[in-house]
Image: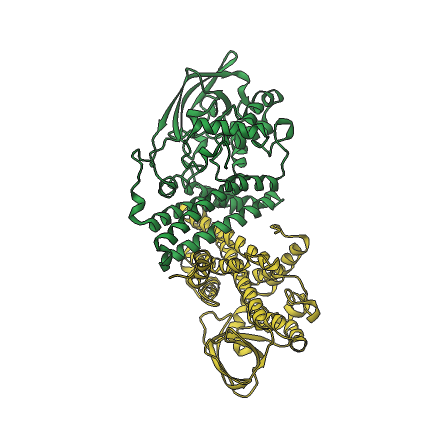
Chain colours: A green, B yellow
């Protein structure tokens, strides 16, 4: 990344330089690189899985910051393509593809973190509008987004996965308030999002009333897609940085550090070939169990990598030259990676999923 | 690299799995354990009826061709049953060393006999081996199935020789070994005549790679079997009024086993593919596979005992066969720390 956008090369913070990153998103779109896996009819390139993998790897290799609209491109777009009406496709897809409609995700709630089926945010139909009340939390990048998709409870008294509806809502309206949540590394990528008689048109729902669970689960399946391989290129950069630091300060001579670096290297390679296995498996009924293990694998690997980074850096890793509590890549990795084993389903939830769905264990009795 | 099995590989996997499931039963393995650690009937059937013993060996020498991916598939199936067979020493080490390191004459003399099961090969390394012309003096205390071997391939890490087990000066003593499915022997050579193989570097590389991949694949099969058997137990065993598999503490152990096993599977097939395709990554991949898969197996076998409770600790239950095999695979052919240090050297250079 050497040209016009070199000022945002290597931006580590997810919230860093949002305006420039939106411009970058639009630059990608101008050359039809914003959503290559989508159908060409909607601005994509009909790219095969292998092509998407190559693109994701090259993208990360160039040191380009994370995609400011990855939720739009990887989650909202595919959801609309799969479950949306023709009219909804026309309304949303061009903006997402162009990088002008930025999306965020309204799933988690204060009392329903990994337990999506217990969301309480309510929506009721009033005339030709849905009226939404409740609260979401951990809404990444909501403060720079234009739209939010929200899982709401539309059936009074319903419980669990029943009675949920999936709504698309414009963020810029008086009924939606966004408050940043300052996190462990000083950054504020996440938000609390409050809905007080927030409104969206009646036809903003994806699927039918009560289909919310099905849509949300379909959407989570997209998360297991190609992005995993691009993500690994970022991990590669982080590990290389640690290797360089270990060489520079002599930690590379410590036999225990050598073992841990070797383990990290092995783990990274195995994630890569694991993802390849997952993506090349054509019989999807067979991959489910193996694919389920991927989240816990990378999250634990990266958390360990953060600890290894600090052990390589020594006490120097605990001070920063920046006055505003901003951290360089490796200390920031150490702090941020504590979230990896929580978001997208905690390690504990993942283990339940693996045991129940992957190994067929009986569910825990519920009260 | 291809990451899904093709139809032929799928067929080999199914055939091998069915063969070992049916024949390498606990009763038969336990009979072999009481003897020299080999189920000889099974070995002959594997070599001659199933005809998978020549996999990974050149067709010109009576082998079946194909590569380490197919060899790994077979070893995985054998490992799943802790089959008591001399596969490692005879096929992955001796035969591979002779095929790649020997000349026409060596290949013609020994490979058909090893592949058919008529002869059993052993292999060992002795860093302090002394050679006086073609006379060798030295030995090893840890030769897998050494007491059953007809020939030994012997190396000092630079050269390779073939030694006949019945040659004057060879002494073989079977050790009482923790893993009775693969007992070790103490072999000593006292001025024994050896036959030098002309291409030692190729023979050593082939034997190392095949052995690392085979051990890793065997570990993968064993680890998966530990998980499968524990899952089956977790469904049927009821405590506190419900199947123990419904308890979260139990589920999480099972899930962790599966997470490790899926990575071990990636490691084994990455290594096998990388060797078959002569990729630059092959050296790193075989070290990764050997260390990772063996550790995974040990962890899963230990968990299998724990998750079975008291019954898992008994001689009657098969859990200890897996546990002991897993321990043996961790230490043989270099322990995990040694393999990881090889990788550390690749990414960091030698320690100062």
Spot occupied by residue B228 in the image (x, y as percentages of width and height): 52, 54
View extreme (front): residue? A3
View extreme (right): residue? B60
Residue B236 seen in this snapshot:
no
View extreme (bottom): residue? B168
Out of A119 and B76, give the one closest to the viewer.
B76
**In this figure, what is the number of numbered marks?**
0
Residue B100 seen in this snapshot:
yes
B304 sits left or right of A26 in the view: left
Spot occupied by residue B35 in the image (x, y as percentages of width and height): 52, 76
Spot occupied by residue A349 in the image (x, y as percentages of width and height): 43, 40
Out of A72 and A17, give the one closest to the viewer.
A17
Quarter occupied by residue A142: top left
| B295 to A170, vertically: above or below | below
| A260 to A58, vertically: above or below | below
On-image quarter of the C terminus of chain B: bottom left
A248 sits left or right of B101 in the view: left
Spot occupied by residue B150 in the image (x, y as percentages of width and height): 58, 79
Out of B23 and A177, give the one closest to the viewer.
A177
Which residue sits at x=49%, y=41%? A231
| A103 to A248, vertically: above or below | above
View extreme (top): residue? A127
Quarter occupied by residue B94: bottom right
Which residue sits at x=63%, y=71%? B99
């Amino acid at each position: 990344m050497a040209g016009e956008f070199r000022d945002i090369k290597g931006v580590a913070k997810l919230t860093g330089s949002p305006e420039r990153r939106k411009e970058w998103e639009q630059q990608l779109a101008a050359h039809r690189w914003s959503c290559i896996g989508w159908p060409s009819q909607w601005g994509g390139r009909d790219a095969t899985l292998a092509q998407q993998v190559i693109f994701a790897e090259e993208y990360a290799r160039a040191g380009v910051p994370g995609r400011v609209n990855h939720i739009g491109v990887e989650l909202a777009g595919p959801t609309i393509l799969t479950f949306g009406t023709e009219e909804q496709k026309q309304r949303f897809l061009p903006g997402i593809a162009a990088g002008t409609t930025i999306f965020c995700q309204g799933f988690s709630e204060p009392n329903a973190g990994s337990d999506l089926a217990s969301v309480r945010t309510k929506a009721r139909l009033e005339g030709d509008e849905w009226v939404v009340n409740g609260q979401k939390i951990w809404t990444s990048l909501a403060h720079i987004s234009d739209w939010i998709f929200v899982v709401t409870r539309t059936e009074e008294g319903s419980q669990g996965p029943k009675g949920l509806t999936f709504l698309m809502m414009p963020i810029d309206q008086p009924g939606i308030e966004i408050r940043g949540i300052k996190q462990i590394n000083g950054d504020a990528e996440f938000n609390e999002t409050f809905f007080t008689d927030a409104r969206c048109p009646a036809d903003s729902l994806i699927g039918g009333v009560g289909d919310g669970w099905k849509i949300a689960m379909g959407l989570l399946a997209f998360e297991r897609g190609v992005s995993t391989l691009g993500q690994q290129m970022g991990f590669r950069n982080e590990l290389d940085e640690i290797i360089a630091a270990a060489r520079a300060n002599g930690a590379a001579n410590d036999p225990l550090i050598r073992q841990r670096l070797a383990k990290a290297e092995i783990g990274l390679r195995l994630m890569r070939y694991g993802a390849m296995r997952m993506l090349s498996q054509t019989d999807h009924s067979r991959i489910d169990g193996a694919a389920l293990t991927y989240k816990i694998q990378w999250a634990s690997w990266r958390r360990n990598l953060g600890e290894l980074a600090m052990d390589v850096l020594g006490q120097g890793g605990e001070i920063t030259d920046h006055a505003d509590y901003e951290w360089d890549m490796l200390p920031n990795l150490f702090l941020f990676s504590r979230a990896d084993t929580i978001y997208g389903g905690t390690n504990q939830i993942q283990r339940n999923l693996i045991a129940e769905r992957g190994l067929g264990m009986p569910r825990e009795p519920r009260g | 690299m291809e990451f899904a099995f093709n139809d032929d590989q799928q067929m080999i996997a199914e055939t091998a799995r069915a063969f070992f499931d049916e024949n390498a039963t606990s009763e038969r393995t336990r009979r072999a354990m009481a003897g020299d650690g080999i189920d000889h009937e099974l070995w002959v059937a594997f070599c001659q009826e199933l005809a998978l013993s020549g996999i990974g060996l050149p067709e010109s020498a009576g082998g079946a061709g194909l590569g380490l991916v197919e060899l790994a598939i077979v070893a995985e199936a054998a490992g799943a049953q802790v089959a008591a067979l001399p596969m490692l020493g005879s096929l992955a080490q001796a035969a591979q060393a002779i095929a790649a390191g020997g000349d026409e004459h060596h290949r013609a003399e020994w490979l058909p006999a090893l592949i058919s099961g008529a002869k059993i090969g052993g292999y060992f390394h002795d860093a302090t081996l002394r050679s006086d012309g073609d006379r060798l003096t030295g030995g090893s205390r840890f030769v897998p199935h050494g007491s059953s071997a007809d020939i030994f391939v012997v190396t000092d890490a630079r050269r390779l020789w073939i030694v006949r087990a019945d040659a004057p000066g060879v002494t073989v003593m079977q050790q009482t070994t923790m893993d009775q499915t693969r007992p070790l022997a103490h072999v000593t050579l006292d001025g024994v005549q050896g036959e030098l193989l002309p291409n030692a570097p190729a023979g050593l590389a082939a034997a190392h790679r095949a052995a690392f991949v085979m051990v890793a694949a065997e570990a993968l099969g064993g680890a998966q079997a530990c998980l499968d058997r524990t899952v089956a137990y977790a469904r049927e065993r009821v405590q506190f009024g419900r199947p123990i598999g419904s308890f979260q503490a139990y589920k999480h152990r099972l899930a962790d086993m599966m997470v490790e096993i899926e990575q071990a599977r990636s490691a084994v097939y990455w290594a096998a593919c990388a060797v078959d395709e002569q990729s630059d990554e092959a050296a790193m991949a075989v070290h990764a596979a050997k260390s990772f898969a063996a550790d995974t197996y040990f962890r899963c076998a230990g968990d299998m005992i724990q998750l079975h409770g008291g019954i898992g600790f008994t001689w009657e239950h098969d859990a200890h066969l897996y546990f002991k095999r897993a321990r043996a695979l961790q230490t043989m052919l270099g322990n995990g720390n040694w393999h990881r240090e090889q990788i550390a050297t690749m990414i960091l250079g030698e320690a100062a």
